Image: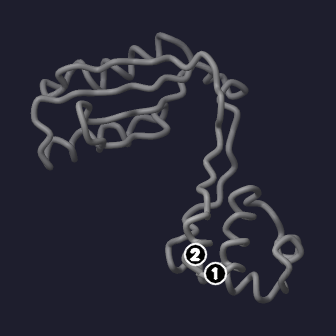
């Protein structure tokens, strides 16, 4: 990974809607080189999505929650079934299987407590494998930045 690819990745993480000409100017390259590099990064699976981030409160989903779960049996089949149910829940934005005392961490954006409880009823209350779930409601945001630092790549190149 060379320094131009790193600069392209950093620029696109900050502003995914940048034009190719603007990108070339920001990273000090030519538009044709940037276009080829971006395609190569996409084909390599390094650049995976180009999306806009949205203010959840402005969409009527200002109740943010971090939900942790503990299960009885964390085998492949039960994880797959749980994952499928989570995937079907539009209010759940992120879901991770984790190591340690917990088995999964979910992050959701809900309209209100009624929707939150309905989602929990569907995901957890009907699942005999769920031992416990705990919810932490977000009261303040200290940092909300999905960009991944490229510092490791810089040291490798």
Query: In screen coordinates, is 146 left or right of 131?
Result: right
Query: In screen coordinates, is 31 left or right of 94?
Result: right
Residue 72 vertical placement versus 4 (above, below): above
Q: Quadrant of the N terminus?
A: bottom right
Residue 59 picture location, percent across and down:
68, 28
Q: Quadrant of the C terminus?
A: bottom right
- Determine the secondary structure under disc 2: helix
Q: Residue shown at 62%/72% (left/top)?
A: 154
Residue 21 picture location, percent across and down:
87, 76
Q: Nearer the viewer, residue 127 or 24?
A: 24
Q: Residue shown at 10%/35% (left/top)?
A: 73
Dot 2 corresponds to which residue?
42
Q: Residue furthest front?
A: 155
Q: Residue shown at 59%/77% (left/top)?
A: 41
Q: CA distance from mark 1 to mark 2?
A: 5 Å
Q: Are marks 1 and 2 in contact (CB under 8 Å)?
A: yes
Query: In screen coordinates, is 88 left or right of 36?
Result: left
Dot 1 corresponds to which residue?
39
Query: In screen coordinates, is 145 left or right of 120?
Result: right
Q: Residue shown at 68%/24% (left/top)?
A: 57
Quarter of the image holding residue 156? bottom right
């Amino acid at each position: 990974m060379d320094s131009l690819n790193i600069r392209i990745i950093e620029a696109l993480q900050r502003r995914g809607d940048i034009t190719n000409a603007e990108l070339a100017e920001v990273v000090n390259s030519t538009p044709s080189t940037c276009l080829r590099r971006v395609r190569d990064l996409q084909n390599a699976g390094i650049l995976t999505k180009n999306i806009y981030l949205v203010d959840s409160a402005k969409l009527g989903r200002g109740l943010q929650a971090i939900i942790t779960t503990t299960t009885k049996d964390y085998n492949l089949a039960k994880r797959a079934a749980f994952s499928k149910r989570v995937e079907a829940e539009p209010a759940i934005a992120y879901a991770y299987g984790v190591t340690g005392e917990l088995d999964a961490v979910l992050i959701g954006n809900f309209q209100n407590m009624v929707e939150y409880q309905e989602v929990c009823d569907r995901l957890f209350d009907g699942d005999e494998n769920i031992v416990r779930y705990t919810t932490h409601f977000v009261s303040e945001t200290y940092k909300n930045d999905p960009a991944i630092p490229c510092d490791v790549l810089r040291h490798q190149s």
